[in-house]
Image (cartoon, rainbow, N blue to C red):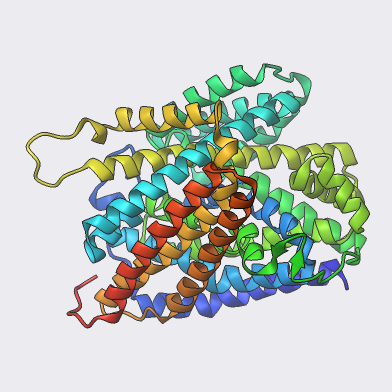
Amino acid sequence: MSALFLVLFSIVAMLVAYVTYGAWLTKQWGVDDRKTPAHTRGDGVDYVPAKSPVLLGHHFASIAGAGPIVGPIAAAIFGWIPVLLWIIVGSIFFGGVQDYGSLLASIRHEGKSIGEVIEVNMGRSGKRLFAGFAWLTLLLVVAAFTNIVANTFVSVPEAATASVLFIGLAVVFGFAVHRRGVSLGIGSVIGVILLFGCIALGNLFPLALSRNVWIAILLGYIFVASVTPVWILLQPRDYLNSFLLYFMMAGAVLGLLITRPTIVLAGYTGFNINGQYLFPMLFVLVACGAISGFHSLVGSGTTSKQLDRESDAKVVGYGSMLIEGVLATVAIITAAYITQDQLTALLANGGPVNVFSDGIGVFMTSFGIPFTIGKSFVALAVSAFALTSLDTATRLGRFILQEFFAQEGADKKNPLTNMYVATGITAGLGGLLAVTSWEAIWPIFGSANQLLAALSLMAIAVWLKKTGKNNVMFIFPMIFMFAVTLLALVFLIRDNLATGNWILVFFPVVLFGLSLVLAYQGYVHLSKKEETTKA
C-alpha cells in the first residue's frame, strides 16, 4: 500500500466533507452573519474580533498541541487500518461536528463556555458539575504541559531560545497589525521570515537552564499571557506558530510525493493487545486526531470571543478539525512506513514525538533538507504547539472559574470573578500539581478528555433541540462517546483495583458517577417535549 495514496485520500476526503457535510451542517443550524460577541461585548482584552486566517491559526494551534501526533502513533499497536479509518470518520462526523457546534453554541450564548450553555438549557446544577470537571481537567493539562515544555527546553535548548524569541516577535507583530495598521499580508510575510530567523538564532545561541527554572518561567509566562489582551500575544503568537505546522505538513507531503514509501506495518494486529481492547482504547488513544473534549473548551472559550463573523465558524471550527485529521494521518504514516522493530526502537528512544520527527525528517531529505535539521525543525514545531496549548488552557481555566462564581444582578462581585485572581489560582494550582503529583493521576486524562467530548455533544444537542433545530448529527456520536468513556473508566477501575492503586480507583469512580448524573439529565431534556426558544 502506498503511503502517498493514503495521505492524498485523507486530504480529498476532508475537502469533500468540508464542501458537502460542512455546508449541510451550516444550513441545518441556520448559521448567518449576525453580529458576534466579539463586537457586541468587545472589551479589548478577551472579546476582540480577528480576521478568519488569524483566528484559524489561533484555534488550530491551540487544539493541535501534541495530541494528533502522539495519539495515532500510540494507537498503532492495533494496526494502522483501524487508526486511519477512525481518524477520517471521527474527524468528519464526530470531532468536526463537535468543534463547529460548540463554537456556534458559544456565539449564540454571548461567547460563554459550554458550562453556560448547559446552565441555560439544562439548569444550574448541570453547569456546576460540568464546569468543575472541566476546570480540574484543565489543571491537569496545565501541569502536564508545563512539564512537557520544560523537559523539551532542557533537552533541546535551541528550542527554548527560539520559543522565547517567538514571544517577542508575536508582540511586535500584534502591535504592528493592530495599532500601526500594517496589513495582515505584509505583516505575515515579514513575520514568517523572522520566525525562521528565530529558529536560526536558537541554533546559534541555545538557552540552557534547569528544569525547575523553566517551570518557574513558564508559570510566570502563562499568568501574563492569560491576562493580557489577546491581540498583543495570544492571537499573533498562535497565528505565526500555525505557519510552522503548515510548513511541516507541506514538507511531509512533498517528501512523500518524492520518496513514495510503502506501508510495511501490520494493518490489523488484533482486538486484544496485551490486555488493551480496541474498543474502547483506540477511541481514547487517538483523541485529538478524531475528537477531543479539549477542543470544545477552546471553541467555546478563546475562539468564540474573537470570531469576526458568524459565517467564519465553519472554516475555523469545522475546517481546523479537518486539517488536524490530515495531520493525524501524516502521524500514523510515520509509524506505518517502518517495521515493527524500528517503531519499537524509536518509541523506546523518545516516544511518539520521536517517531513523528524521525519520519518527517527522513521525508524532507528527499528535497535537500539535511536529516538532523529536518528532525530538529519538527521537534521545535511540536514543542511550540505544546506551549500554545499550555497558555490557552490557562486562559480557559480563568474563564471557567470566573463564570462559575459570577452571579447576574449581585450587588457585590465575588473576588474569584476577578481575572487576576482567577488566573493566579489556575496557574498556581496547575504549577503545584506540575511539581508534585500530576503523573499519579495523568492516566485518567484520556478518559476524562473524551468524557468532556461526550458531555459537550450532549449539551449542544439539547440546545439545538430547544431552539427547534436539527440535532440528529449529535445523537450517535454522543451515545458512542459515552459508551467509549464509561467502558474505559470501568477497565481503568478494574486494572487499578487489581494493583491496589487507590488514587486511580477513586478518580475514575468519581468521573463515572458524574458522567451518569449528567447523561441522565441530558436524556431527560432530549426525550421530553417542550416549547422551542429562539436561538
435 horizontally vs 416: left or right: right
Q: In the picture shown, does residue 28 fall above or below 436?
A: below
Give the residue displayed 66% in from the left and 38% down from the top.
383
Nearest the eye: 98 or 244: 98
280 horizontally vs 530: left or right: right
Q: Position of residue 408 (x, y in %)?
A: 13, 47
Q: Position of residue 329 (x, y in %)?
A: 72, 63
Give the residue displayed 68% in from the left and 42% down from the top.
382
Q: In the picture shown, does residue 400 fall above or below 477?
A: above
Residue 228 at least partly seen: no
Q: Quadrant of the C terminus?
A: bottom left
Nearest the eye: 238 or 209: 209
Residue 475 at least partly seen: yes
Nearest the eye: 119 or 194: 119
Q: Quadrant of the N terminus?
A: bottom right
Give the residue displayed 75% in from the left and 27% down from the top.
155
Find residue 196 and report its image quarter.
Answer: top right
